[in-house]
Image: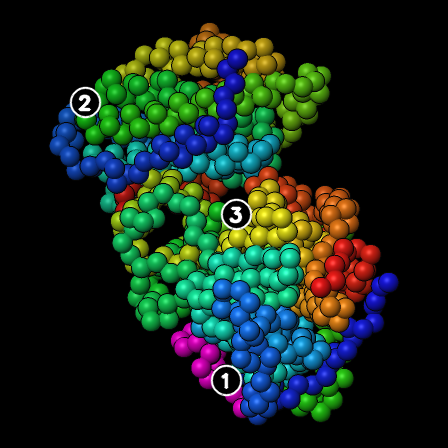
């Protein structure tokens, strides 16, 4: 039912390209960010930018795994588009005077762990895993963080940029759910076996260990900015709703795992989950810099706020 | 009746003039080699004294058309193939042929591709005609300028220039079945007729520009690799190279030395293997000159080395894995950064697309003024290129190393055969021929580098020589038996192609990647699925039973 024509989607993606240069980053309105908002917004934007950037790397891994050329090309574009979002968000930060010179803001430690994990293992992960995690992250961004930003920040340039970003994200989600459904086809038994096989993979366990605290940290950030956490949760429920609207989608074991995990994330009473994960967030903050992975992969440096280079 | 022997007529006979001395000139930049190369007058003069039949006064006008006596053979194109055909005809005593060339010089691909760094991926001792060896190659892999010198040498040594009609652009070929004649329609000139026609227009003769949005909006300099602008000064410029194929990997290392910044836009990385290139020592040249058999032995050795590569490149075998390992090691040695390695690692089997040979491509990408960009290109703007990551790259010059429009379907100009059939229509969904050289319904017409004649692992000239011999046999049959037409039987052609496609299905080319070998529908009309030795065996027999013929 919800199937989309990937060929048409690719054509649409190609036809909907935009560039940083399409936006006037010096237009008036920057002053609409209040002094009170500024420091929290700075932290929030830095995280957001990094999450987009990290999502981009996820798409790069997915392009490698795509079962056909069209999907491969779509993912190649999505990889670039996520980078474009990160670039645009950095441009906003530049506009709001949140950058230290030309320097890219440091990612927080959870992000650094995720970056490290993505860099080392994402290319080895099956499409099923990435294909489920990425829509979850996207929907959290699309549904909660971005709309929230637009509610609290009055700067018209911000609205202009996020209108375009949201437009892209809606296509990413469309394809994301389509793939979830695509993977629901086939022998359930095989899928369960394959899923179990992957779960036991230590590389994935490391991945989970970075992903879970990242979600909780995002929740904390959101609350710090004054957003009701319900907004984030509502968005995560959307994943469950849209992903589960067809039998194929529901049959995808990874959809089941991720959405159940989402349910746990939104339920604060799940102490057995939140206790340790929140502790992990605090713990990661305590990891001394010298034991953090020191080598920064070069793809991390590809980000820029400059419309023209 | 079949014949396998006759063609051996003249192989390895040394030509009249001496082969070109290796020029000290570096491969390509600056002036074209063309002017200087027209050397060695002796042979040319000798040949010029023999007037060809076609130059005699026109026969009594029987038609309203200006009816010069039809030539025996007309050849379209004065590149390696057309000139090779001419040499074989001449040596066989067939002198009344014409070569129609749309440009104003010989050399085809090597006349057009004069970009800096242009060179051949096959060792020169194998990328040359066995019947015209050149002991003076300066390098194991010689540059484009030296190859062009060799071509000019062929022209003068075999006295071909008088046969060539420059600036004769063929716009159509029509077959007159009643008379058994081909007519070549020419742009702005009277048509020309001949009993046999040879299509030697070359598969790589039309430059291809990519279909990117806004390319016409871009105001900066645009250069195609096959139409190089030697007057443009790259010094201090911001330059982009689009494409990372065989031409690009040769251009990039040269450009990077001159430009301020070089941005390389890559869509799909190719497999790159090291090139065992070295300068030919003087004693080697002396040896080849004194003892031609030694050069033949080297050629043989090179031939068989390349034949072995077929096992890696054409079919999926343990050697394929080995070749991939070699290529990966080459990458690992030359590129230290993980992400860049990932960007440069192909995700298809080696051989599926053309394998590149280079020692200096990867190091060039690592230079401080070079940037490898793998984001898709969204569009051109007035000042440069916008990539899908939302960034505009401001540029002074864009180099299109985007290759050629390789005809896999259709023909470069209308070719009309018997009963009004048109080849372009028949080939619309993929070209087909018999043994790559004849097409049923188009008698007396020979294709050089026709459908399914492409090598992926060995010298194109080895394949070409086999085609030249075959075409020569066909022409002989026509002239000696005074035939009006010689037309391959459709059933024979169909059977041949059925087998061919069956064999192609098992090759690496058809293993799932997109390449210029395949049509949009994935039909392989380009490559020959086998060893060069198999191709030569296929071309070595001319079975009369395969053809319908009619006497004049």
Q: Is B383 or B168 nearer to us in this picture?
A: B168
A120 inside magenta stretch:
no
Q: Are marks 1 and 2 on the same chain?
A: no
The residue wearing badge 2 is A154
Image quarter of residue A29: top left
User: Percent position (x, y) of residue B146?
Assistant: 54, 78
Determine whether the residue tagged by mark 3 lies in a helix, strand or loop: loop
CA–CA distance in space, label 3 to label 2: 42 Å
Question: What residue do we see at 45% from left, 11% from top?
Answer: A237
B30 inside magenta stretch:
yes
Determine whether the residue tagged by mark 2 lies in a helix, strand or loop: loop
Point out the image quarter for the N terminus of chain B. bottom right
Answer whether labels 3 and 1 touch (C-beta < 8 Å).
no
Question: What residue do we see at 46% from left, 66% from top?
Answer: B190
Q: Which residues are magenta?
A: B25-41
Question: What residue do we see at 47% from left, 37% from top?
Answer: A76
Q: Nearer the viewer, mark 1 or mark 2?
A: 1
The residue wearing badge 1 is B38
């Amino acid at each position: 039912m919800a199937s989309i024509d990937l060929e048409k989607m690719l054509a649409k993606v190609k036809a909907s390209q935009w560039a940083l240069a399409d936006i006037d980053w010096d237009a008036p309105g920057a002053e609409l960010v209040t002094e009170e908002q500024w420091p929290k917004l700075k932290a929030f934007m830095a995280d957001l930018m990094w999450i987009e950037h990290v999502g981009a790397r996820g798409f790069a891994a997915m392009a490698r795994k795509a079962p056909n050329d069209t999907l491969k090309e779509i993912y190649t574009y999505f990889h670039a588009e996520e980078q474009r979002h990160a670039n645009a968000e950095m441009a906003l930060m530049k506009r709001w005077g949140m950058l230290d010179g030309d320097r890219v803001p440091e990612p927080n430690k959870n992000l650094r762990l995720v970056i490290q994990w993505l860099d080392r293992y994402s290319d080895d992960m099956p499409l099923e895993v990435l294909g489920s995690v990425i829509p979850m992250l996207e929907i959290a961004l699309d549904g909660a963080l971005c709309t929230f930003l637009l509610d609290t920040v009055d700067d018209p340039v911000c609205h202009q940029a996020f209108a375009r970003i949201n437009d892209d994200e809606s296509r990413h989600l469309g394809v994301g759910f389509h793939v979830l459904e695509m993977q629901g086809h086939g022998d359930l038994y095989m899928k369960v076996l394959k899923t179990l096989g992957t779960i036991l993979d230590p590389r994935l366990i490391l991945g989970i260990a970075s992903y879970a605290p990242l979600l909780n940290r995002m929740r904390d950030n959101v609350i710090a900015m004054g957003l009701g956490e319900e907004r984030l949760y509502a968005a995560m429920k959307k994943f469950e709703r849209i992903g589960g609207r067809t039998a194929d989608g529901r049959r995808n074991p990874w959809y089941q795992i991720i959405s159940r995990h989402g349910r746990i994330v939104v339920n604060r009473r799940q102490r057995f989950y939140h206790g340790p994960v929140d502790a992990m967030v605090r713990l990661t903050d305590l990891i001394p810099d010298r034991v953090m992975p020191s080598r920064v992969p070069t793809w991390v440096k590809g980000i820029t706020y400059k419309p023209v280079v | 009746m079949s014949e396998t022997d006759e063609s051996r007529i003249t192989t390895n006979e040394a030509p009249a003039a001496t082969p070109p001395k290796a020029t000290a000139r570096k491969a390509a930049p600056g002036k074209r080699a063309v002017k200087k190369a027209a050397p060695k007058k002796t042979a040319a003069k000798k040949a010029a004294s023999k007037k060809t039949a076609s130059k005699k006064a026109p026969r009594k006008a029987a038609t309203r058309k200006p009816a010069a006596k039809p030539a025996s053979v007309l050849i379209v194109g004065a590149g390696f193939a057309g000139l090779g055909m001419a040499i074989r005809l001449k040596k066989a005593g067939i002198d009344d042929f014409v070569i129609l060339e749309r440009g104003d010089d010989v050399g085809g691909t090597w006349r057009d591709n004069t970009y800096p760094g242009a060179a051949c991926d096959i060792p020169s001792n194998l990328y040359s005609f066995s019947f015209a060896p050149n002991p003076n190659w300066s390098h194991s892999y010689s540059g484009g300028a030296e190859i062009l010198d060799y071509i000019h040498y062929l022209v003068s040594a075999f006295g071909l220039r008088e046969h060539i009609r420059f600036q004769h652009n063929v716009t159509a070929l029509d077959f007159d079945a009643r008379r058994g004649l081909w007519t070549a329609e020419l742009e702005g000139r009277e048509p020309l007729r001949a009993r046999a026609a040879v299509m030697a227009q070359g598969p790589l003769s039309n430059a291809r520009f990519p279909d990117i949005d806004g390319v016409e909006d871009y105001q900066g300099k645009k250069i195609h690799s096959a139409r190089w602008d030697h007057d443009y000064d790259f010094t201090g410029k911001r330059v982009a190279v689009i494409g990372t194929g065989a031409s690009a990997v040769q251009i990039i290392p040269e450009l990077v030395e001159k430009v301020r910044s070089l941005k390389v836009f890559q869509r799909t990385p190719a497999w790159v293997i090291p090139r065992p290139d070295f300068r030919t020592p003087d004693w080697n040249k002396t040896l080849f000159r004194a003892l031609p058999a030694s050069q033949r032995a080297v050629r043989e050795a090179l031939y068989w080395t390349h034949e072995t590569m077929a096992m890696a490149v054409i079919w999926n075998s343990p050697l394929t894995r080995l070749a991939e390992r070699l290529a990966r090691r080459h990458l690992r040695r030359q590129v230290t950064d993980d992400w860049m390695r990932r960007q440069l690692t192909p995700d298809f089997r080696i051989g599926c697309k053309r394998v590149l040979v280079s020692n200096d491509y990867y190091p060039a990408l690592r230079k401080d003024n070079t940037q490898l960009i793998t984001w898709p290109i969204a569009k051109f703007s007035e000042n440069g290129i916008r990539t899908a990551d939302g960034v505009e790259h401001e540029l002074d010059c864009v180099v299109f190393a985007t290759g050629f429009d390789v005809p896999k379907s259709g023909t470069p100009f209308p070719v009309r055969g018997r009963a009004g059939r048109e080849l372009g229509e028949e080939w619309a969904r993929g070209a087909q021929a018999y043994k790559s050289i004849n097409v049923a319904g188009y008698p007396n017409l020979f294709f050089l580098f026709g459908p399914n004649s492409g090598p992926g692992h060995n010298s194109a000239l080895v394949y070409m020589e086999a085609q030249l011999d075959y075409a020569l046999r066909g022409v002989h049959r026509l002239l000696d038996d005074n035939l009006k037409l010689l037309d391959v039987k459709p059933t024979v052609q169909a059977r041949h192609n059925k087998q061919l496609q069956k064999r192609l299905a098992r090759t690496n080319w058809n293993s799932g990647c997109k390449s210029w070998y395949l049509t949009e529908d994935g039909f392989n009309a380009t490559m020959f699925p086998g060893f060069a030795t198999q191709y030569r065996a296929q071309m070595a027999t001319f079975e009369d039973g395969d053809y319908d013929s009619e006497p004049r």
